[in-house]
Amino acid sequence: MARVVFDNVSKHFGTVKAVDGVSFEIDEGAFICLLGPSGCGKTTTLRLMAGLEQATSGRIVIGERDVTQAKPKERDVGMVFQDYALFPHMTIAENIAYPLKVRGVGSHDRNARTEEVARSLGIEQLLARRPGQISGGQQQRTSVARAVVHKPQVFLFDEPLSNLDAKLRVEARSFLKHLQMELGVTAVYVTHDQAEAMALADRIAVMESGRVVQMGPPLEVYRRPATTFVASFLGNPPMNLLPVTLRLDGSDGRLHGPGFELDAGAWREGLGAGSRDGAELTLGVRPEHLQLAPDAASATLSGQIYTLEPLGPETLITCMVDGRLVTARLFSDEPPALDGTAHFRVDPEHLDLFDQDGNRVPR
Amino acid sequence: MRLLRLVVSRAAFYAVAAVFACLFALPLVWLVFAPFDARANLSLRLPHPFTLANFGKVFSNAFAVRALFANSIIQGVGAMLLVTLLATLMAYALSRAPIRGTDLLSYGLVLFSSIVTGTAAMVPLFLLVFSLGLIDTQLGVILVFTGGLLPAAVFIMRDFVDSIPRSYEESALVAGASPWRMFRDIALPIVRPGMMVVAVWTFVNVWGGFFVPFILLRSPSNMPASVAIYSFYTEGGTPIITLTTAYSLLYTIPVLALYLFVNWRYGFRFFGGIKS
């Protein structure tokens, strides 16, 4: 168990800044997800932690030790690779025991520990087989077993669920979360799947172009996205983002959007004195915060129905609002009977406003 | 009608295949029968009268026995070990080093190698070996063969090394292995089938090589079997068929044995990675 500190760490490959001045601190025993689209630098960040890449600049601390220049074997981490990277010429038992073997643990202790770990992961009956002879889910568990067998200070996961099929993925996800809670080891988990990140993490770090855009507890990041990028990345379906124009004709100004108008009072302080008439802003609203309204008069916005998608416990309604698709999520297993047009009401509490650069405007 | 056509076409195919099979099999069958025939000639027939006297005469030729069971083995095994070891290390370096143009280098090496052991290079090679003072030494022969076979061997090995996912090695490093240990524990066992292919291929090449030892060696006591077989020719230059075939049969045994041993011990199989 150890904390991990990244202090202004950069990693450049030629002219490409894969990781660009990343700083964060991970508490002992925390479960952190690095979330972002492919190429955002999340895997490079993880590899910097493991020592598989050397930082161009900055400082990395694991526990109390500065490991910026340390080799992988000096870092005492366990890593689960995306393709599991099980050694094909070794049995499952030999695979799991490998970290102990290179540490010079005697064969008696090694076997005992291997069996103990295999039993706790439910793969003790596979020990004599080879990686090619077991299923994807079992390979994944073997890979986890190999990462935990030497009781590392930090666990690193590089998209470990992306090779599993959908059903197994959810199962493996809860298994990983339970395991991490049980072991209480600091874990860093890389994923591009926002649902995985939300489900697993104590804190999520959303990355974009080599930088951490926002870091915080999952719900915090979900409820108060710092930028339009975060807003559109988290949530499925993602947050609706609508262009609005600020008009300073009232005392607080008003926001003019496609087919609607709102009072901008809630953001008066955030917009500050610098706000000018005609500023192009972005308004965000989560699909679940759009509620059906009986008629146009009581609605915030209305649109032509584009698709209705009944998903069982919920129904997605996608509307065309002034040339833009807006999605609403209704928590009802009965699709509403609508005749071409849908009217929606929004609690102003649940609206987010972003400035021209896509940054959140505080309320 | 269609059935008839199928039957006829099948029959025709087998007939043609049988003719080709015979063309290839007959000389081999002849090679197995002739050494046991007291009056063997170039025709294929069952040994009559059956005799082992031909082998007796071959074994009484000390020069030929030494060539086959000492010199050829030394040169073949020497070049085999050297080529396999160097090719593995070079292929690994070429595959993993962050240097541009290693592909071009590999292809260049293969093209280059087709010239080096060829007849065209024999004069400069002779001069080189001469100035190294290695004329009439086994080492000279081993080094020339190694130089000639190494590029193609590197090329073959590179394919094997390239197919090891990096994540195998990285996971060994994260597990706590040093780079050397990672190479030994992970990379080497995975490319072993490739090493075996290269080893057998090298051995066979050196074993059958005539020109290089013929030019570079002087004293009869250093000659390999490929050259020594000429001691079973008459003074006039015609082969004594009973003896050349007996010697040839013995000459094939080590190659067969090596192949069978490697196949039994390691198998020419390849551990592919886990699909990713």
Image (cartoon, coloured by chain):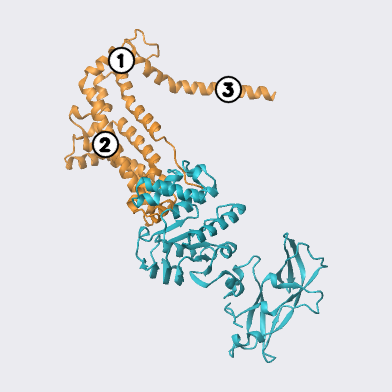
Residue beneath disc 1? B242
What is the quadrant of residue A9 in the picture?
bottom left
Of label 3 and label 2, which has the lower sequence position? 3
Pointer 3 residue: B12
Judge whether residue A112 can be spotted in this image. yes
Of the image marks 3 and 1, the number of the one nearer the N terminus: 3
The residue under label 2 is B78
Q: Amino acid at mark 3?
A: Ala
Residues flagged by tags 3 and 1 on a common chain: yes
How far from the left and from the top, in percent, is residue A187? Answer: 48, 62
Q: Is residue A96 left or right of residue B13?
A: left
Neighbor class of circle 3 (other Cα within 10 Å; few <14, some 14-19, many 20+) is few
- B257 is higher (above) or lower (below) than B43: below
Residue at disc 2, secondary structure: helix
In the image, residue A359 lies at what x, y percent?
57, 78
Looking at the image, which is closer to me, B105 or A252? A252
Quadrant position of residue A20: bottom left
Q: Nearer the viewer, mark 2 or mark 1?
A: 2
Would residue B118 be found to the left or right of residue A221 on screen? left
Question: Residue B21 appears at what percent x and percent y?
Answer: 47, 23
Q: What subunit carries mark 1? A: B
